[in-house]
Amino acid sequence: MSTDPVRVGIVGLGRWAKVLTRAAKKSDKLKIVAGYSRSEEKRHAFEQELGVAAMPDLQTLLAKPEIQGVILTVPNEQHLAVAAEVAKAGKHVYTEKPIASTLDDGLEIAALQQKYGITVTVGHSARLMAGIRMIRAAIDRGELGRVAFLEANFSNERALELTPKTWRWYKDRAPGGPLSQLAIHHFDVLHYLGGEIAEASSMASKLSPVGAEVDDQSMTLLKFSDGKVGYVGSCWTSPGVFSVRVFGSKGLMHYEIDFGAWDTPDKLHKTSTLYIQRGKDGYASREELKVPESDMFRAELEMFAESCRTGKSGELTAENGYTAVAVVYAALRSIERNGQSVRIADMIAEARARVPESSHVA
Amino acid sequence: MSTDPVRVGIVGLGRWAKVLTRAAKKSDKLKIVAGYSRSEEKRHAFEQELGVAAMPDLQTLLAKPEIQGVILTVPNEQHLAVAAEVAKAGKHVYTEKPIASTLDDGLEIAALQQKYGITVTVGHSARLMAGIRMIRAAIDRGELGRVAFLEANFSNERALELTPKTWRWYKDRAPGGPLSQLAIHHFDVLHYLGGEIAEASSMASKLSPVGAEVDDQSMTLLKFSDGKVGYVGSCWTSPGVFSVRVFGSKGLMHYEIDFGAWDTPDKLHKTSTLYIQRGKDGYASREELKVPESDMFRAELEMFAESCRTGKSGELTAENGYTAVAVVYAALRSIERNGQSVRIADMIAEARARVPESSHVA
């Protein structure tokens, strides 16, 4: 096995590109060697600040033979167009979550894999948090017994600060407000912990005084294929919360992170909480568990590097990526239908019918 | 003002009658002076154990002029019949929660008030917990800013232990399983904290291996009249949980009790948690608040004593009681309708139409 780091490029050089580039610098599995942004100013500033060579255009970046993959941190609406260019050049694709703004785009991005023989990795990093991994391990060991019920919340104060100049102000760019911006993370986490999600039923409300177009309160109920039920709540007008609670017949586990540490994942374990409550006893008998240090951003990039090296999809698949988007759109339809439950498979089948070139995707 | 304790009787001498009688003994506001059960054995055992004089029949109890009110701890299906007897005798009524098994019975019990000039108190004690009172006080002071979002959970392991000999096994006796048995408590708590509930959308599942008729997983979304949203979850196959979290624009508060202390409310404060999280900071900056000692069972009985003394309804009204039942039935209908939201006012209007004698109730 080669010990050489995989060489990758990065496209779209905003705030998140910096977070990922700093995470990559801590890894010996990959190296970000070239960057491109349409703004000349941005790409030179990025080169100066982070030492990533600025490319004059995307084709120059893609023409470099040593580059095996490209990280996309462009706006969600541009994921498909840029991913298609990258795939045509035979390079592997990493996109930030969500895979795309629309389910149709998400399916097209997934279809690039078979069409061009590349892999697509979608950065649903929340499932990589050490506490989430520990809950999954406990489920797999049978320590919680039959898991029946999952609750998750991801909230922050964003809607109190929206202005017409921010893209999240608008319905078409941030559909459902915190539903597409925050709850989507937990749809993937609950998919990871609970298995296939069959249906979603959702409620929304708009309460922030700022007057934005988007809703700012979101609550969604999920029915899993095996009968489990799940809840994902997201309040966009409150202090920050990120929590997951899993209820099983032998025990429940609760994980909650200090929201202030979201952008510095290597520090998350210092202020996060994980406990298990066994049997019938009240919480006085809850047992605190130690969460080891981890870095979800480095971990997702290393998974991408592995896919670049092997040509095989890892855990952060395009399918998981578009499934999370499908849950968002099922929830949006459920809101229109006054809460009626909407099947995830129906949303995907309808989008496939609209996107014929992706209809061969499994 | 008289300092003499109000004299009351108690009917239905099971486990819960003992809990309430012990709570009453700690109060100087009321005295339980007579008890009746159809079982002669039970009423004599109760007299021996708790010093409450056994009455040979209900009419003898109701004929005692010093008795101003009667506590009903009979099964829910018998609430209406016994309450009607008590009301006809001109005595005030206290019923355990729920006010009745059906919304129709609940409306009829409420109607007894105007018909016979008595008051009905419904023992929704959870809202009297010290932590819940502190959250409401913080909301009223404006400390949380605009409250937009409420979450509550009440779970236990009951469905793992059901047998065909237990009444909760059956759909018609425990509709929705934990929905009517546990979630109903939080419907009243959220009504107290969030104001009028307009709609409910609900999901259920049956996962316990015991084979009971009833569902054992329940999740309900609530829309409040002012646009707030609420969630009440209840898992009947897990360790015990009782928690409430309220999200406001300036802060959130979380209250959680040690489930093992449910039957000994004067000890709840010792192992319960209440914290406030202000502004944008993560939970590392959460501030723990001290919960004072309280006793929700003594408090509800003292409210009843006050109504006996003044002839005026207190906070634990019949209307609050049947509203909680209406939310349960709205949720049950929503489950039948695949999650579609059901208006609480519609449930109450339909029940009124079926129960003409209660149609004059405000």
Image: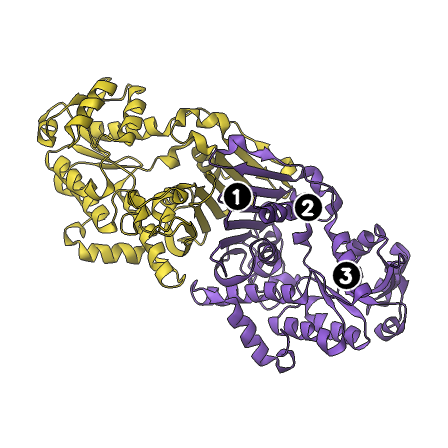
Chain colours: A purple, B yellow
Looking at numbered disc 3 in the image, what kind of residue is underneath it?
Phe
Where is residue A58? Give x, y as percent.
84, 73
- Crowding at dot 2, Cα within 10 Å, few <14 / some 14-19 / many 20+, comes out as many
Would residue A242 appear left or right of A60 to someone viewing this image? left
Task: Tell me the SS state at disc 1.
Answer: loop
Q: Nearer the viewer, mark 3 or mark 1?
A: 3
Q: Which residue is mark 1?
A: B145
Would residue A157 appear left or right of A115 to someone viewing this image? left
Q: Which residue is mark 2?
A: A130
Where is residue B29? Give x, y as percent.
27, 21
Q: Are marks 3 and 2 in contact (CB under 8 Å)?
A: no
Quadrant in the rendering for residue B278: top right
Instruction: Name the disc covering residue A210, or none.
Output: none
- Crowding at dot 1, Cα within 10 Å, few <14 / some 14-19 / many 20+, comes out as some
Mark 2 and mark 1: span between their CA atoms? 34 Å
Q: Which residue is mark 3?
A: A304
A292 vs A102: above or below: above
Q: Is residue A164 visible?
A: no
Between residue A182 and residue B74, name the one nearer to us: B74
Looking at numbered disc 1 in the image, what kind of residue is underneath it?
Gly
Where is residue A274? Give x, y as percent.
62, 40
- Residue positioned 52% across, 50% down in the render: A150
- Do the residues at pointers 3 and 1 share their chain? no
Looking at numbered disc 2 in the image, what kind of residue is underneath it?
Ala
Mark 3 and mark 1: span between their CA atoms? 43 Å
Would residue B343 appear left or right of A292 to someone viewing this image? left
